[in-house]
Image: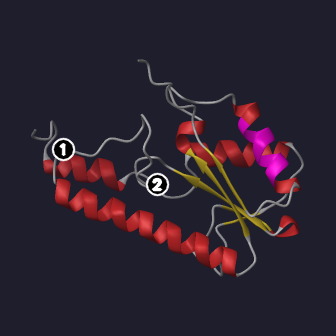
Amino acid sequence: MADVVPPEVRSRMMSGIRGRNTQPELAVRRGLHGLGFRFRLHVRGLPGKPDIVLPKYRAVILVHGCFWHGHDCPLFKWPSTRPDFWRAKITRNREVDARNRRELGDLGWRVMEIRECALKGPGRRDPAVVLERAARWLRGDRRRGRIEGIRPRATV
């Protein structure tokens, strides 16, 4: 299927998508701050420049957009235009994510991933629940954590 907008318009639209300070990231930051957590942002010295770094808890929180990180949820759909480009791009993003998580763990950091679908879309959770789960994880001792949207149950 052909794209519904001209290539120059699509290019301008895609270039306007931010990698930092996204709406889901801002929501998580506001919520954590409101719960009393203090953090640093996008620390350059850490693998992947994590979105939220909490040195006191030796923890990082990665807020991932479902499209760019290829999450299997209702917010992700493989583009029909330039499929080879997008498969390579999103596959590479997943590989970089895995490497960054591994390197952060090797450096002694705990890693929590919060997926965009936990905060928006048909499977979104109550924001207070997402923040409470993140806060409980931060205060705990688990090395890894992940918060995703609610998956619809299969009907038979």
- The residue that appears at 49% across and 49% down in the rendered structure is 65
- Residue extending farthest to the left is 2
Circle 1 sits on which residue? 80
Residue 152 on the magenta segment: no
Type of amino acid at the residue the image marks with label 2? Arg
| Location of residue 92 by image quarter | bottom left
The picture places residue 4, in percent across and down from the top left corner, at 15, 36
The C terminus lies in quadrant = top left
- The residue that appears at 50% across and 30% down in the rendered structure is 121
Residue 107 vs residue 29, the one in the foreground: 107
Horizontal side, residue 149 vs residue 5: left or right: right
Q: Which residues are magenta?
A: 130-137
Horizontal side, residue 59 vs residue 153: left or right: right
The mark nearer the N terminus, 1 or 2, is 2
Circle 2 sits on which residue? 18
The picture places residue 149, in percent across and down from the top left corner, at 57, 36
Residue 10 vs residue 146, the one in the foreground: 146
Label 2 element class: loop
